[in-house]
Image: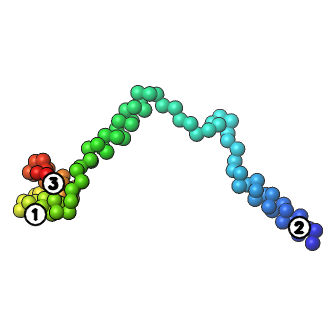
Amino acid sequence: MKTLAVLVLCAVVSVCLSVKGPAPSPDRPNNEVFVKRDLASALMRQKRAPARARAAPALTLTQLESLREVCELNLACEHMAETAGIVRAYKAHYGPLPF
């Protein structure tokens, strides 16, 4: 019985020590990354630019349906609406949104 208790105690200690994880290596103590300021600002500009380009006004379902009806009359616009979206297709074929 004592052997079983010692064995269970050793197993618990082993599990506790293995959960802690490996020690960091001496050549890379943490995961910090340093980038020059101009490169970092260029990367952030690239990351933010598409978000500004995608910002479209929030349209109601009625307005979207109105755009779709106009676009149905033009086969190229209808195809583009199916692939790129109705707002982008309308803007490409008819200019800015009327509302």
**Circle 1: is it few (<14), some (14-19), or many (20+) Cα within 10 Å?**
few
From mark 2 to mark 1, how far is it between C-alphas?
Answer: 78 Å
**Secondary element at tag 1:** helix
Q: Is residue 78 visible?
A: no
Q: Is residue 19 above or below residue 2?
A: above
Which of the two labelled residues, at mark 3 and mark 1, occupies the earlier sequence position?
Answer: 1
From mark 3 to mark 2, how far is it between C-alphas?
Answer: 73 Å
Residue at 8 percent across and 60 percent down: it is 70
Question: What type is the residue that disc 3 sits on?
Answer: Ala
Marks 2 and 1: which is nearer the front? 1
Q: Is residue 71 visible?
A: yes
Q: Quadrant of the N terminus?
A: bottom right
Location of residue 15 (image quadrant): bottom right
User: Can you identify the residue that label 2 sits on?
Assistant: 5
Question: What type is the residue that disc 1 sits on?
Answer: Glu
Viewed as shown, does residue 81 lie left or right of 26? Answer: left
User: Can you identify the residue that label 3 sits on?
Assistant: 89
Q: Where residue 6 sits in the image (x, y, percent)?
A: 89, 64
User: Can you identify the residue that label 1 sits on?
Assistant: 69
Viewed as shown, does residue 72 lie left or right of 33? Answer: left
Marks 3 & 2, CB-CB < 8 Å contact: no
Residue at 13 percent across and 59 percent down: it is 67
